[in-house]
Structure formats: structure tokens, C-alpha cells
């Protein structure tokens, strides 16, 4: 997947294109059938210069009605557990793999992800965060380019080119499972410890590097994920 062409830009380096420009290209998107059932496009919200970006799978009912991600029960849970990382909602950026609600809150379909992925990719390139927290399997699979389940990936960082990726459970799923709620809180505490001990602007380790803090990358995922977000410009 090449870099989406944004009008007015010849060489789209990271952080060059604004979120407003990406939203303008998205417009009243009709690229997949979800446009027929949505109430609102849910683009994303937060600090355009955030050090930490959170990625979920898709809007739910409340998000669809309000046009903002994570505003229902899952959003309230997210707001609460952010405190474990020493973060406030206004300090982060939140987006989803899909910008429109799937009927019945079903999982995203591959063709829907294919249609929506370029917009999330450009959001990530625009913000260029140090850390991406992927919440749930669909977001984790998209960013890490793996089919390994969240239960095996959570609890550690994965180095993917510029980004450190922290997979964790979706806050909505954690509300339905007390054991997962405890684990997601552990993950957010670990995130907070990392932020406290690694200053902003610190150079990332190279792909494939391992340490106590950053274990071996997901097999086969490093090069694919790095190319996805840092690949050739078009």
C-alpha cells in the first residue's frame, strides 16, 4: 500500500500532512457499504501531536451517534484506565481501523478494512507517535500484520520501525471480563512506567532489536509493518 496522495503535497513525509487535510480527503466517504448504515463518520479525536496514539477496531452505537470515538461505556473505561499510565484523554489521539459502525457491532470485514486502512495509515503518519496502543484483535492485526491473538501479544512492547506497539484488550471487552480488566490495567501501568523512563524524542531502537523492555518482534511482522507506515511515497 503506497502513501495516499494528499492534494498540495508532493513528498508526504511523516508529520507533513495535517489531520484536517486527511479528513478533507475522506469527505463523505462512500468506499464501502457501511456508508449506507452509518449515522456519522467517526474520524478520530485528540492531540494531533500526541506521543501515544490509541487504535480501536470500529465505532459502536454511541460513537456512531456522536461522531467521536470511545464515548460510550468503553470510552468511560478507557478514560479511567488512562490514569494508570499517567495520561489524560486530551494528551492522546484516538482512532479506529474503521471510520463507520458495522451493523450490530460485528467485526470488520476484510473489504471494509481495505477501504478504510489508507486513512488510518495517514493519520498515523500525520501524528507520528512514539507509541501505538492497539486495542483488540482487529487493530492489533492491522498494525502488527499478524494473526496471532491478543492474549499472546499483550503485556509487552513490539518494536516496529519508528513505533513501539503495545497490544492490549479492547476496553469494551474488558468490561465484560474482570480478568481482562485486570490485565488491561496492568498494560496501562506498564505504559506509564515506559513513558516515565523514556523521554519524548528518544531515538527508537532499530527493527529486530531486543532488550528486556522490547522483546523479539512478532515473527514476520517487522518488515511488513515498517513498510506499511514508512514505505515509498507516491
Image: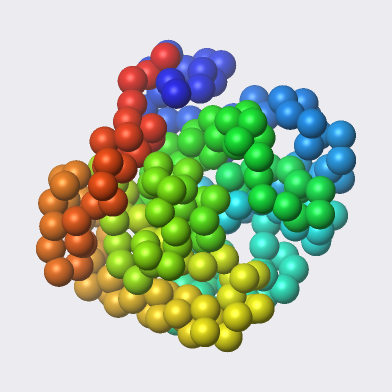
Q: Quadrant of residue 97?
A: top right
Q: Is residue 12 above or below residue 120?
A: above
Q: How many marks?
A: 0
Across and down, in percent, residue 18 comes to 52, 35
Quadrant containing the C terminus is top left
Q: Quadrant of residue 14?
A: top left
Across and down, in percent, residue 133 comes to 44, 59
Across and down, in percent, residue 124 comes to 46, 42
Quadrant containing the N terminus is top left
The answer, for residue 63, to whether it is visible in the render is no
Classify residue 132 as left or right of residue 226.
right
Q: Is residue 61 above or below residue 102?
A: below
Across and down, in percent, residue 210 comes to 13, 57
Question: What coloring was used for the rendering?
Answer: rainbow
Nearest the camera: 54 or 13?
54
Q: Residue at x 64, y 31 (%)?
A: 111
Q: Residue at x 26, y 47 (%)?
A: 219
Nearest the camera: 8 or 208?
208
Q: Residue at x 58, y 30 (%)?
A: 114
Q: Residue at x 62, y 70 (%)?
A: 173
Amino acid at each position: 500500500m503506497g502513501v495516499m496522495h494528499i492534494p498540495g503535497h508532493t513528498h508526504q513525509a511523516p508529520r507533513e500532512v495535517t489531520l484536517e487535510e486527511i479528513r478533507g480527503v475522506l469527505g463523505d466517504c462512500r468506499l464501502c457499504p457501511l456508508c449506507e448504515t452509518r449515522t456519522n463518520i467517526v474520524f478520530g479525536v485528540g492531540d494531533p501531536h500526541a506521543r501515544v496514539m490509541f487504535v480501536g477496531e470500529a465505532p459502536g452505537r454511541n460513537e456512531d451517534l456522536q461522531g467521536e470515538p470511545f464515548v460510550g461505556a468503553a470510552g468511560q473505561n478507557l478514560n479511567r484506565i488512562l490514569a494508570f499510565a499517567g495520561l489524560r484523554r486530551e494528551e492522546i489521539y484516538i482512532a479506529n481501523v474503521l471510520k463507520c459502525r458495522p451493523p450490530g457491532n460485528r467485526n470488520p470485514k476484510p473489504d471494509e478494512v481495505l477501504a478504510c486502512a489508507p486513512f488510518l495509515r495517514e493519520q498515523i503518519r500525520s501524528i507520528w507517535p512514539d507509541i501505538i496502543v492497539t486495542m483488540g484483535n482487529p487493530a492489533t492485526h492491522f498494525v502488527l500484520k499478524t494473526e496471532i491473538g491478543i492474549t499472546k501479544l499483550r503485556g509487552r512492547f513490539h518494536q516496529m520501525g519508528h513505533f513501539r506497539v503495545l497490544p492490549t484488550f479492547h476496553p469494551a471487552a474488558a468490561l465484560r471480563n474482570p480478568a481482562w480488566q485486570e490485565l488491561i490495567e496492568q498494560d496501562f501501568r506498564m505504559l506509564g512506567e515506559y513513558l516515565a523512563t523514556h523521554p519524548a524524542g528518544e531515538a527508537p531502537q532499530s527493527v529486530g532489536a531486543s532488550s528486556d523492555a522490547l522483546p523479539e518482534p512478532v515473527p514476520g511482522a517487522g518488515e511488513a509493518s515498517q513498510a506499511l507506515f514508512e514505505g515509498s511515497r507516491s
